[in-house]
Image: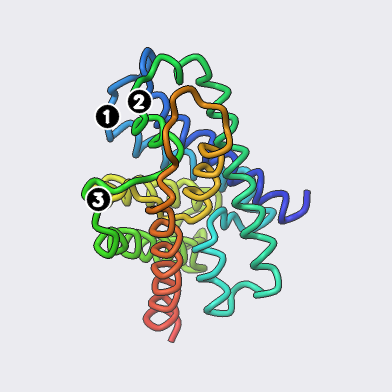
């Protein structure tokens, strides 16, 4: 498997399990309907852990353009590979969303709310103020990239001073879980441009019963915010941890 294929499959796994838990909680007549934010945040954390376990050893398990760009900015990833990684991540996210649509196919018609249908695929603000909506995305992704770099540092992966290498992806999943619980309220914590853009494209293109608009007016926020936050998180780590 190539690194680009691994990034595609890994991001597909994230969205299949991540958007899948949102569908389970939000769509009518689902077994998990109204299970709440704790279930959603836990599902996303586990989704990321499973995806990183699956492909991290092949591609590095970026699965997020903000991570890829952040690593490139601090010299830990070649810029020549950035476009291919980002394309693979967006395509993987799109395919994951299509699988969620198929898995919950009977439930779209049973769900009247257009907002809930859209929320299965992509994020939206609790209070719509675009400049302010950028802040939780920047802060959340800052914490994501900083946390990933710190968790996966050589000090933490050393068996004599830290924990086994195989535990790294689980801790990355716990980091995403923590971000969701603590910072997910304002915007739904996209913290990943591919996670939002790929499924939003799927929502736009798929024949979903009574789906409504795809909220393209807001779509730039969960793309720009995470990229800014990812770069800042990587630079912060480089300055304070490795300077």
**Badge count:** 3
The first of marks 3 and 1 along the sequence is 1
- Quarter-wise, where is residue 111 in the image? top left
Crowd rating for badge 3 (residues with CA inside 10 Å; few <14, some 14–19, many 20+): some
Spatial separation of the CA atoms under disc 2 and disc 1: 7 Å
Q: Is residue 161 visible?
A: no
Residue under numbered circle 2: 25
Q: Nearer the viewer, mark 3 or mark 1?
A: 3
Residue at the location (65% across, 75% down)? Answer: 79
- Quarter-wise, where is residue 240 in the image? bottom left
Residue 209 percent location from the top left of the image: 48, 22
Spatial separation of the CA atoms under disc 3 and disc 1: 16 Å
Crowd rating for badge 1 (residues with CA inside 10 Å; few <14, some 14–19, many 20+): few
Q: Pointer 2 and pointer 1: residues touching (CB < 8 Å)?
A: yes
Residue 210 percent location from the top left of the image: 44, 24
Spatial separation of the CA atoms under disc 2 and disc 3: 18 Å
Q: Is residue 131 visible?
A: yes
Apparent side of residue 125 relative to residue 21 in the rendered image (left or right) = left
Label for residue 186? 3
Q: Nearer the viewer, residue 93 or 155?
A: 93
Apparent side of residue 61 relative to residue 70 in the rendered image (left or right) = right
Residue 80 percent location from the top left of the image: 70, 73
Label 2 sits on a secondary structure element that is: helix
The first of marks 2 and 1 along the sequence is 2
Q: Pointer 3 and pointer 1: residues touching (CB < 8 Å)?
A: no
Q: Nearer the viewer, residue 46 or 29?
A: 29
Residue under numbered circle 1: 36
Label 3 sits on a secondary structure element that is: loop
């Amino acid at each position: 498997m190539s690194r680009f294929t691994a990034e595609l499959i890994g991001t597909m796994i994230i969205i299949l399990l991540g958007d899948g838990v949102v569908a389970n909680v939000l769509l009518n007549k689902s077994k998990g309907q109204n299970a709440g934010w704790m279930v959603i945040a836990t599902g996303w954390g586990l989704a990321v852990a499973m995806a990183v376990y699956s492909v991290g050893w092949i591609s590095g398990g970026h699965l997020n353009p903000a991570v890829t760009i952040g690593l490139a900015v601090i010299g830990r990833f070649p810029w020549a590979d950035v476009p291919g990684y980002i394309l693979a991540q967006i395509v993987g996210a799109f395919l994951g969303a299509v699988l969620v649509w198929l898995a919950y196919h009977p439930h779209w018609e049973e769900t009247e709310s257009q907002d809930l249908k859209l929320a299965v695929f992509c994020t939206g603000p609790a209070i719509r103020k675009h400049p302010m909506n950028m802040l939780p995305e920047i802060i959340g992704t800052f914490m994501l990239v900083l946390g990933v770099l710190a968790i996966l540092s050589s000090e933490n992966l050393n068996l004599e001073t830290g924990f086994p290498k195989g535990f790294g992806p689980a801790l990355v999943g716990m980091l995403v879980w923590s971000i969701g619980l603590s910072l997910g309220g304002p915007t739904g914590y996209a913290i990943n441009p591919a996670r939002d853009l790929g499924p939003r494209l799927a929502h736009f293109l798929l024949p979903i019963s009574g789906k409504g608009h795809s909220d393209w007016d807001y779509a730039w926020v969960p793309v720009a915010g995470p990229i800014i936050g990812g770069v800042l998180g990587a630079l912060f780590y480089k300055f304070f941890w490795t300077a």
